[in-house]
Image (cartoon, rainbow, N blue to C red):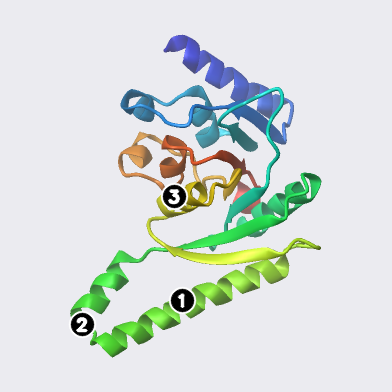
Amino acid sequence: MFAELHCFCTILKLCKLNIVDLLVLGALEKENILKFYIGSIARNISRKAKCSVLLLTNPSAKPHKFKKFVVSGVENPKTIHTLNTSLYLARKLNVNDVTVVNEVHNPGLAMAIAEDSTAPEAKEIKKHIAEDYTENMEELISKCDAGDIKLTEKIIKGKPGYAISKYANDKKADLLVINSPDTNLNLFDRIFTHDIEFILADLPCNVLIVHSRVNGD
């Protein structure tokens, strides 16, 4: 345990001293219960690093060709940088299948619809919610540097982190690209699961966590 902690701290320190832009790590696809709370080196670094981190689920000297990217389109100032980074990488790897995904999750609103609205009212509210998410997605994509890459937009329902992880797995994506956490995560975040923790606990594929310095991160 001490050796693991020392290694974790040393890697973070070296990244900071050398102003590293991207750290590449091998990671097991799934953590066991003990590792989920204590944290593997790769996942601890992913939670704390001040640079982008690429987690490779099956590192190899001869990696297979990337064909499909899934990118989180969550409403956040960091997302445009994350999307542009994804597109830059897609061009370099000749990837043309890039899907931008936004997750719809509002339990409070769903409960209000169920309790207080008639069926037509609930349907209208859901329609407006879908339209808002679609408009936000289209606005995001209009600001990015897509070039000749055709982006696919996808709105999915479910808990942030869990839903996109499942979608990436179902789509058999080669790379899932997400924002770095807005704050350093701690044990409390993992007990009351934070969106990134769903992804780190059971990697659906290779994962790129894009660190951006928006808002002083």
154, above or below 161, in the image:
below
**Of residues 59 and 117, which is closer to you in this image?**
59
Q: Is residue 69 left or right of residue 88?
A: left
Quadrant showing the C terminus = top right
**Of residues 116 and 150, which is closer to you in this image?**
150
Q: Secondary structure at mark 2?
A: helix
Amino acid tagged 3: Lys
Location of mark 3 (residue): 166
Residue 107 visible, this angle: yes
Of label 3 and label 2, which has the lower sequence position? 2
Tell me, for residue 130, which label it has, or none. 1
Residue drawn where x is 29% and y is 71% of the image: 110
Q: Give the alpha-carbon distance from disc 1 to disc 3, as whole Å.
A: 20 Å
The answer to whether marks 1 and 3 mark residues whose Cβ atoms lie closer than 8 Å is no
Q: Residues within 10 Å of mark 3 (few under 14, many from 20)?
A: some
Q: Give the alpha-carbon distance from disc 1 to disc 2, as whole Å.
A: 20 Å
Q: Looking at the image, which residue sits at the far top?
A: 3
**Of residues 150 and 144, which is closer to you in this image?**
150
Q: Residues within 10 Å of mark 1 (few under 14, many from 20)?
A: some
Amino acid tagged 2: Asp
Q: Give the alpha-carbon distance from disc 3 to disc 2, as whole Å.
A: 31 Å
Location of mark 2 (residue): 116
